[in-house]
Image (spheres, rainbow, N blue to C red):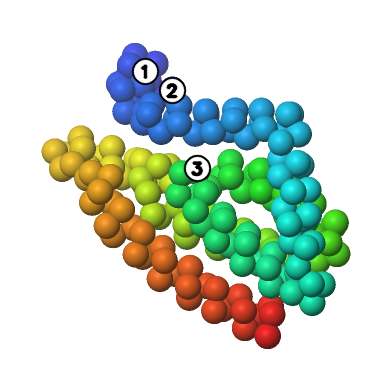
Amino acid sequence: LVYPQDIEGMMMRIEWDTFFYLAGLFVLVEACGRMRLISEIGRALADAIGTAPESMQLTVAIFAILWVVTVVSAFLDTIPLCMALVKVIEVVSRRLGLPLPPLAWALAFGACLGQNSTIVGSANNVVAVSLCERSGYTITTGQWLAIGVPCVLMTQVTISVYMYFAYIM
């Protein structure tokens, strides 16, 4: 903006694919919120967890949130996903009387680590693949999955053990 004559050059350097990808996800999350889909998901999740014996509800909630979010974050970017699911875990916590911190950590670990399994799981992944393609190196979805999925499984198993000893044991 300091050199208005170079606006076209700046516009050419913007990662438009990533910009529109994230913009679309934010619109999707807002639309789901306005349709009350997020609160319905929270109620449904709370009802499902509530079927477990009361002494097991925290365990079920932690692992359900951790692993479901891990899978979902492979296909949705972390920021809009967490924006939506923070409201969901608040509903679960309030409806079942469960402590919020372990649910928040399960959400954080699931979202932040699960995104590494696919290219579209994170804007960072999309940018990295885009930059590689600009440099003449193509990373296929299969190549990414071959490395990403095993890494995510290893980290999530480790986090599951941690969560068990930190919040359940």
Task: Give the image location of residue 27, x and y in percent.
Answer: 60, 28
Which mark is first along the chain, 1 or 3? Answer: 1
The residue closer to the viewer here, 53 or 152, is: 53
Kind of element beneath mark 2? loop
Image height of 18 relative to 108, above or below: above
The residue closer to the viewer here, 38 or 11, is: 38
**Which residue extends farthest top?**
5
Query: In this rendering, which labeled residue sits more in front, label 3 or label 1?
Result: 3
Q: CA distance from mark 3 to mark 2?
A: 32 Å
Which image quarter is the C terminus in?
Answer: bottom right
Residue at screen point 74% across, 61% down: 49
Task: Give the image location of residue 131, x and y in percent.
Answer: 26, 40
Mark 2–mark 1 CB contact (< 8 Å): yes
Q: Seen in the image, is 19 located left or right of residue 81?
A: left
What number is the disc on residue 76? 3
What number is the disc on residue 7? 1
Neighbour tally class for label 2: few under 14, some 14-19, many 20 plus, Cα within 10 Å:
few
- Kind of residue at disc 1: Ile
Which mark is first along the chain, 2 or 3? Answer: 2
Query: In this rendering, which labeled residue sits more in front, label 2 or label 1?
Result: 1
The residue closer to the viewer here, 61 or 125, is: 61
Q: Which residue carries the number 2 mark?
A: 1
Q: Quadrant of residue 141 in the image?
A: top left
- Kind of residue at disc 3: Leu
Which image quarter is the N terminus in?
Answer: top left
Residue at screen point 44% across, 46% down: 121
Mark 3–mark 2 CB contact (< 8 Å): no
Residue at screen point 85% across, 57% down: 94
**Which residue extends farthest left?**
136
What number is the disc on residue 135? none
